[in-house]
Every structure is written in C-alpha cells, then in structure tokens.
Amino acid sequence: MKYRIAGFVLYCFLAVGVMTAQSEEVKAGSLSTRGVWVSCFEYEDIGLAGKSEAEFRKNANRLFYNIKANGCNTVYFHVRSYDDAIYPSKVTGWSKRMTKGTVPSYDPLKILISYAHKYGLKFHAWMNPYRVTQKKVLNPGDAKTTERIVSQVKEIIYHYKVDGIHFDDYFYPTNEKKYNRVSQEEKMKNVNAMVKKVYQTVKKKKKSLKFGISPAGNIEYCEKIGADVTTWMSVKGYVDYIVPQIYWSDQYIQEGKKTALFKDTLAEWRSLNKRDVPMYIGLAAYKAGEKIKEDPGWKKKSNNLANQLKQIRKGNSEGYVLFQYSDLYRSNAWKEIKNVLASISTIRLNKTKKTLRAGKKYKLKVVSATPSRIVKGIRFKSGNKKIATVTAKGTVKAKKKGTVKITAYYGSRKKICKIKVIPKKSSKKRGK
C-alpha cells in the first residue's frame, strides 16, 4: 500500500444521530461494505500519538464519528505495521508511531474498538504480516515467522472484540537480493502456508470472525511477491474476503495511449474470482485531485471515484475501501469526495406534498440524510419561483395559485416535495 502523509482540516458536522450497524447480508453490487483504512502514518495528525488517555479518547471518538459521517460502515485500522503493536503485546514491542517514546498507561486498541462499535462500525485489525522496516522483512520461508504472526493474531482475537483480521499487500520484498533466489512457486507456497494457518486460527476462535487480504492491484506483481491470489479466490480455507487495490483511473496513459486501467483491472479480478469470494475494491482517495503524469485523470476529473463506484455496483463485487482516512478531508480531494458522498447518499424530507395559501410560509425540513456529512451541503430549489420561492435552507414562501416542485439536492441526489398553492382567503366586509 502506498503511504503518504496528507494534511487535513478537522471538520465539524451537524450531528444526525448514530446509525445502526449494517446487515451481514452480502449482495453483489450492493456496496454492503463501505470501508476506509487508517494507517500508522496518520496517528499523529488525527491526534492519537503520544496522548494522555483523555486526549486519546476525545480524538478517537471524533475519528470514528467522522468515519461514520462519510458513509463508511467498516474501518481497517493499522495495529501492526512494523512487527510492533498498538497494544500491550507479549509477542512484540510497542509501535513507536503510536507511543512517541512514552508507553501509555491505557490500552489504545481497546479504546479504539469501543468507539468504533459505538458508531456501529466494524473494526478489522490491519496487520503487515512480514514487514520489520521499509526494507527488511521477516523471512516468509521460516516456520518461526509464521508462528510469530499467528501468535500476534491470537493475542488480538482472544483479547479484543475485533470483527476481523486484515492483511495488506506486503509479502516477499523485491529489494532484498537473498529473496531473488527463491522461485515464485516457493514464495507462494510459503505465503499460502502462513495465510492458511492464520485463517484456521481465526475460525477456531469464532466462525463469524473474518480474515481478509488486500493485495496489490497488479495480479502479475502479486504472484511475483508470493501473493497467490488465484488460489485464495478459488480454494476454500484461505480468506473470507479480498480487497484488491485498484489504484488507477480510466484515463491512465500506457504506451502513449489512454487506457481504462481501472475498468480493465476490475474485470480481470472479477474473472479470477471463481469461488465468488466477497470482493471489496480498494480505491485511491489519496490520488484525488493530484497531478500525476501517467494518470492525469485524477487532476482533470472530479468523478473518478464516483464512476468507479458505479462499476463496482455492476458485477461480483460488494463494496469498497478508501485509502486513506486523511484524504477524506484533504482540500484538493473534496470535489471527488463530495461526488462519492452524493453517489451513496439518501435524503428524506418531512413532507412530500404540502398545500399552502398564497402569502404563507412553510419550513421544509430534511428529517434524515446519510451519510450525515452531506447535511450541511443540502440545498433547496424551486421549480417555479412565480408560484413559490424557497431559501437555500428550505423555507418555502407561497406566492400565487399553482403547483410547484421544491427540490432538496446534494450533488446528483434529489428529493422532491410538491407544493400546491391556493389563493388567499377572501375578506368580505360585514354590514352594521
């Protein structure tokens, strides 16, 4: 997974209550899983690194409130990034990115899970199974490595109420010469042994616990580093779900020509999914609004992600995961994110029909809107200002006889209330 530290502005919203947890039912094209990754590189910016318990709780609460406000129902939180842990572990040491040199007197993971569940979010513990540093990994061919990984998985699933264990795309490194002598077949054999053991460990604890992997989007590269995605999606006993990182737009420049790389890669993954494993697509929110020479679509267009959601809905894929949380609040990504929110939003008004006398006013209200982040962006528009006007906030003023549509809208999402305007009451003079 490509990491980048993006600055962001913490955003305050109108609270619209806590939404209930999503159904367990998984249907193709339903976007049943709407996730986001929170990486170890974000701890400091989101106020979790080296904090007192009170500060940590305050910022954790805000984090998961914001995640829910963006329409997500699942969070993949980095708990093991460099053979370390964000909780007191007997297997490995503390994450330096979380502690900032001071071991906390509280358990960060326990607090994080409690706040995620408070907002109806599923919490998957995201782990880099092999990585020790950016360049060094634990030897995947060593049985002790698998034992170490499994031991840490056990620590998490037996002591914390997580909803799943999640691995990302780091397997055999390409920058260590000693691994160049290992054949691709042996690499996949070693990684598969570890993956299968982790799957068995998770299922032994609780069958409903999930284990999934987010491999790189390039299938050829996956196999080169030992990620046997073909087996994982065709044979039982390896994963409950898969999240391929398809981090390209459909304006990618390949050999001098524009290529629909997202569309083509998604089709490739779908054709590979012989067992119809639940598949959520990893999307590159971190590229939104950025100038990228080989992938200019991210700068030229603001509907890349929204169009990708349309494609996800059309076949055997059941959701998406955005990389990463910070980019939901990055200023030059906002147009893309706004279109994503619009594509998954719903709006409900207090009235769909209303009769008003000319000269009277009525406050048309949004009684529910999801994701709740869209609330402040909902505007109203009159179809005929001669019959009735409406303010941006929904106050309707009836003017003359007729029927008019008042539309509440956010991006392409609309909800209509029909206003029937009747004449004023006639005032007859009474005799003496």
Image (tube, rainbow, N blue to C red):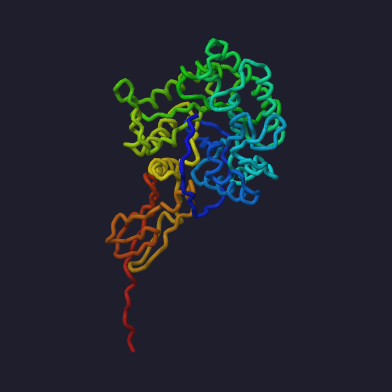
Residue 275 point in image, percent of width and height: 54, 20
In the displayed structure image, the side of residue 220 where residue 406 appears, left or right: left
In the displayed structure image, the side of residue 297 where residue 221 appears, left or right: right
Q: Is residue 298 above or below residue 59?
A: above
Q: Is residue 163 above or below residue 139?
A: below
Residue 287 point in image, percent of width and height: 41, 35
Q: Is residue 337 above or below residue 190?
A: below
Q: Quadrant of residue 149?
A: top right
Tell me what residue is drawn at x 64 percent, y 34 percent.
Answer: 85
The answer to whether one can see residue 228 in this image is no
**Residue at the farthest front position:** 101
Residue 223 point in image, percent of width and height: 50, 16
In the displayed structure image, the side of residue 310 where residue 190 appears, left or right: right
Quadrant assignment for the C terminus: bottom left
Nearer to the camera, 32 or 191 = 191
Tell me what residue is drawn at x 40 percent, y 49 percent.
Answer: 415
**Residue at the farthest bottom position:** 432
Residue 166 point in image, percent of width and height: 59, 30
Nearer to the camera, 256 or 4 = 4
The answer to whether one can see residue 340 in this image is yes
Tell me what residue is drawn at x 51 percent, y 47 percent.
Answer: 69
Tell me what residue is drawn at x 64 percent, y 31 percent.
Answer: 209
In the displayed structure image, the side of residue 51 where residue 158 appears, left or right: right
Q: Quadrant of residue 250?
A: top left
